[in-house]
Image (cartoon, helix red, strand yellow):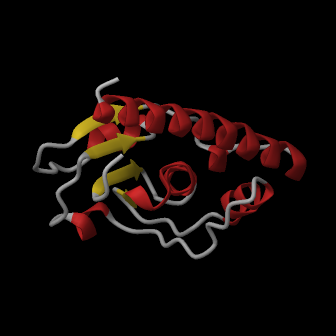
Amino acid sequence: MKKNVNILVLCTGNSCRSQMAEGYLRKFGQEEIEVYSAGIETHGLNPLAVKVMAEDGLDISRHTSNHVDEYANIDFDYIITVCDHARENCPYIPGKATRFHHNFPDPAKASGSEEEILEEFRKVRDMIMQYISDFIQNIESNRSGV
């Protein structure tokens, strides 16, 4: 994949799902892509998202919760919405970006014991990891003409 591919991951609050996706995009795309994550609101980084990503060897503790308007001047190649709410309420983002959407469950809404809530975070993390792995493989194949 060529350098300077800009990817935006968009969620409601930029606290869990988009942060996890950003972590995996950085892992699988390495330095070949520029990754941004944002929300249509900002809720701060969820500590349980940080915890379950660390279990998988990824440190997202320094990520920040950003509002989509902060990236208004970036020309994105791809925009990935990771929840229906963000997809339906996303402000207009001009440009040529190819858009992708997958509605992942919101682990922050999980209830039950601490272990049950953590298990929901892990389940969503694993779903996002697989989705992002497939996404990177697909865009690499498309860019190389395979």
Relative to 124, 68 lies left or right = left
Residue at 65% across, 45% down: 107
In the foreground, 5 or 94: 5
Relative to 18, 71 lies left or right = left
Relative to 58, 77 lies left or right = left
In the foreground, 111 or 97: 97
- Residue 87 image offset from top left, x and y in percent: 32, 38
Residue at 81% across, 42% down: 119
In the foreground, 126 or 105: 126
Q: Where 140 sits versus 1, above or below?
A: above
Q: Which residue lies furthest to the bottom in this view?
A: 62
In the foreground, 3 or 37: 3
- Residue 58 image offset from top left, x and y in percent: 68, 61
Residue at 45% across, 40% down: 82
Relative to 71, 102 lies left or right = right
Residue at 58% across, 35% down: 105
Q: Where 66 sits versus 1, above or below?
A: below
- Residue 24 image offset from top left, x and y in percent: 56, 50
What number of labels is visible? Answer: 0
- Residue 88 image offset from top left, x and y in percent: 29, 37
* Image quadrant containing the C terminus: top left
